[in-house]
Image (tube, rainbow, N blue to C red):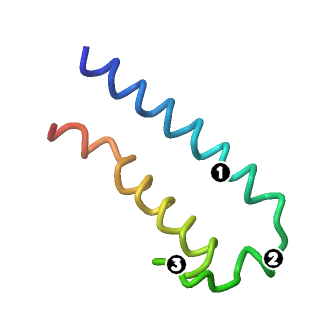
Amino acid sequence: MILEHFKLLADYNRWANKLLYCAVATIGDEAYFADRKAFFGSIHRTLNHILVGDRIWLPQHRWDRA
């Protein structure tokens, strides 16, 4: 049951990332790198934060300890 829950979360993460990256693909470099005065600054830096978070949770050894 827990495995099914994590698969559901992974599917949701994949769906959300695809939606986000498709939306970002429609803007130009100027908008992509512009300082938005947000927590991470630019859209680029925000996406980097999301990618790093996904990569931290990806390795199999994290799940072996759970």
Q: Amino acid at mark 2?
A: Asp
Residue at x 81% of width, y 76% of height: 29
Mark 1 sits on what residue?
Answer: 20
Residue at x 61% of width, y 78% of height: 42
Q: Amino acid at mark 1?
A: Leu
Q: Which mark is residue 38?
A: 3
Residue at x 77% of width, y 76% of height: 31
Q: Which mark is residue 35?
A: none
> Vertically, is 56 above or below 62?
below
Label 1 sits on a secondary structure element that is helix
Determine crowd level at label 1: few under 14, some 14-19, many 20+ residues with C-alpha closer than 10 A.
Answer: few
Where is residue 60? Give x, y as percent.
Answer: 32, 41
Q: Residue furthest left?
A: 65
Label 3 sits on a secondary structure element that is loop
Mark 2 sits on what residue?
Answer: 29
Q: Residue furthest front?
A: 37
Where is residue 35? Give x, y as percent.
Answer: 63, 86
Q: Is residue 31 left or right of residue 44?
A: right
Which of the image's four quarters has the C terminus?
top left
Where is residue 43? Give x, y as percent.
Answer: 63, 71
Tell us which disc is closer to us: 3 or 2.
Answer: 3
